[in-house]
Image (spheres, rainbow, N blue to C red):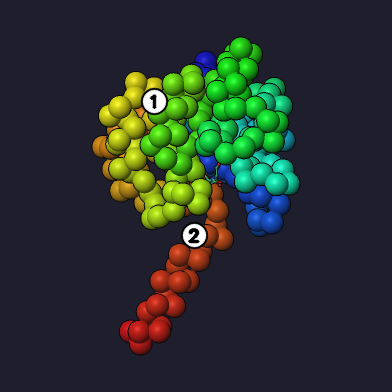
Amino acid sequence: MLSTLIAPKSLVVSCQALPHEPLHGSQHMAVMARAACEGGAKGIRSNSPEDIRAIRAAVDLPVIGLWKRDYEGFDMYITPTVQDAVAVHEAGAHIVALDATDRPRPDGLSLKDTIAKLKQRGVVIMADISTYEEGINAAEYGADYISTTLAGYTPYSEGPLPRLELVKQLSDKLTVPVVAEGGIWTPEQARQALEHGASFVVVGSAITRPQLITAQYTSAMAEARESGK
Ligand SMILES: CC(=O)N[C@H](C=O)[C@@H](O)[C@H](O)[C@H](O)COP(=O)(O)O
């Protein structure tokens, strides 16, 4: 039977491709999810109701769903409104990930009210945060998971990834599970994330964005060519 919870200390693979990316399309994402499952992933992170439905049909793994949407005049793009979160939930996501920064939300609700409204509907929430304070606040408002997804992606949190120290600070302080996500590129970093207290680890680009994986090789080789070796 499918457990809708993510196994402790496991790997979740994020299978996402936006319209401008070569692998865009639910069929491709469903195949990626099957490959991740074969490799031992214990959950999938997926963008958009359409991809979530395709992935639910393809694999028997818990799905963390989100919906990247641009609202004019607003910076946040990960499941910005309550309505977006409900659509993700109704598409079959077991956990709904949303922007849990303090920035203005397009539906005018506070983060606290957003979480409260979704909890009333029985939605399990992953709070995507960029700083320690945001993690503490989201946990206080009732988020079920705190993920470092947005660290490095807000103007006030810029810096190198992955943010394993942030994982450690939050997991030392909170009882709610803390998830290491964002910029994890090697198995060694994923292992270190667990040592820093991560409840589980989400890896995306390093597994499912071949154009970025290819670029890591081509840029390393260009460096060698330029240094003449
Ligand atoms: C910042 C943002 O929009 N992150 C998105 C969140 O869903 C995805 O594009 C990332 O792939 C995901 O967080 C996993 O991270 P990484 O691909 O670095 O392993």
Residue drawn 55% across and 53% down? 209
Nearest the viewer among 111 and 127 is 111
The secondary structure type at the circle numbered 2 is: helix
Give coordinates of residue 75: x percent, y percent. Answer: 62, 46
Q: CA distance from mark 1 to mark 2?
A: 29 Å
Quadrant in the rendering for residue 118: top right
185 displayed left or right of 169: right
Q: Amino acid at mark 2?
A: Ile
Give coordinates of residue 41: x percent, y percent. Answer: 46, 35
Nearest the viewer among 157 and 146 is 157
Please state the total of marks drawn on the protein image. 2
Up-down relation of residue 26 to residue 185 (above or below): above
Give coordinates of residue 105: x percent, y percent. Answer: 64, 35
Give coordinates of residue 137: x percent, y percent. Answer: 45, 27
Up-down relation of residue 105 to residue 210 (above or below): above
Q: Is mark 1 within 8 Å of ligand 1?
A: no
- Nearest to N terminus: mark 1 or mark 2: 1
Residue drawn 61% across and 42% down? 76
The secondary structure type at the circle numbered 1 is: loop
Q: Amino acid at mark 1?
A: Pro
Up-down relation of residue 115 to residue 214 (above or below): above
Determine if residue 73 is in view. Answer: yes
Task: Name the residue carrying label 2.
Answer: 213
Task: Name the residue carrying label 1.
Answer: 177
